[in-house]
Amino acid sequence: MGPSIDAVMRDLAGVAHIQDLLAAGFTRYEVARLHRTGKIYRPRVGWYVACWHTSEVVTAVRVGGVLGCISAAKSYGCSVPGDPRTHVVLAHNAARLRSSTDGFINIAAPTDSGVVRHWATSPPSERFRTGLVPALEHVLGCVDPVWAIGVVDSARSRTESRSPLLSSSAFAGLSAGVSADKRRLLALSSDRAESILESVTRVRLRQLGFAVEEQRAIGRYRADLVVEDQVVVECDGYAFHGDRESFERDRRRDAAFVALGYPVLRISYRRATEDWPAVVAELESVLARDRSRIR
């Protein structure tokens, strides 16, 4: 019995050069047959990707690199802002760039609208992606600063069922290895945020001068954010909580906060990204009404 392509590709983290497959015992004819039958995918001549990998990995291999920046961070489990492009890390000495459409050398490759190219300062730790710390270093220089902090926060976040993706020592190493400007940005990070939207909202409000406390226990619930010790701000994430169970749970939370004297402002991902000035105006209005009520 010959080698198992699934086992071999798992051992190679899902990315193999033809020489890897020949060394594992496959013939060139067998490799070609596996490609024709959809068992493996060939993004460019001589390179193969397991069918269980994402299209982003296929693109990275096609252009001659590995996943980097937010694409790599996402593959580790971090929350990232929406971006349809694939972020790829290339070797620091890569001189000839490959097209993301066919994998051939193409002098117009830097203009590919679907790919963002970064340059490695060290070899990737895995065959299909860079390490988490190098990925976050690229995030800090590529993504809008407020959203970059959200990505770092999601890597540091700890829950009852999951240890943080980025340990305290790894975060310290990340901070020590970046520029002074990026260290000042990292000083805004927190390991308590439960969503990227919560992180972005916290940082934006503090930049506007609001006093913001995160994850405060109020009664039997924990509020995402408490602003000026008066208003609870709940962050609803990417999608609106439209199913009945989520809707009822949110209403119970809101009622409990209001009963304890905290008006509630809910912020959706769409409003945070598309209508932020209106969110701030609404918050200021709620704060003003609450101060008037207290007086």
Image (tube, rainbow, N blue to C red):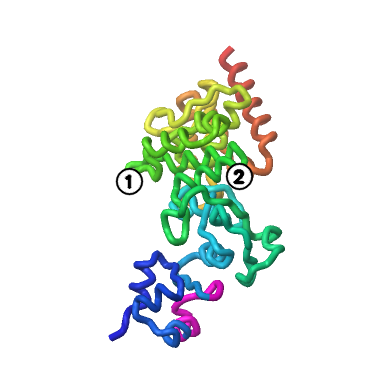
Asked if the stretch drawn in magenta spans residue 36, the answer is: yes
Helix, strand, or loop for circle 1? loop
N-term-proximal mark, 2 vs 1: 2
**Disc 2 to disc 1, how far (Cα)?**
31 Å
In the rendered image, is residue 135 in sight? Answer: yes
Which residues are drawn in magenta? 33-45
Q: Is residue 256 visible?
A: no
Residue under the point 52% across and 31% down? 183
Q: Nearer the viewer, residue 25 or 14?
A: 25
Residue placed under numbered mark 2 in the picture? 142
Q: Which residue is mark 1?
A: 161
* Label 1 neighbour load within 10 Å: few <14, some 14-19, many 20+: few
Residue 253 position within the rendered picture, expressed as x and y whole percent measured from the top left:
45, 37
Residue type at mark 1 is Ser
Callout 2 touching callout 1 (CB < 8 Å): no
Q: At which x and y percent is residue 230? A: 53, 22
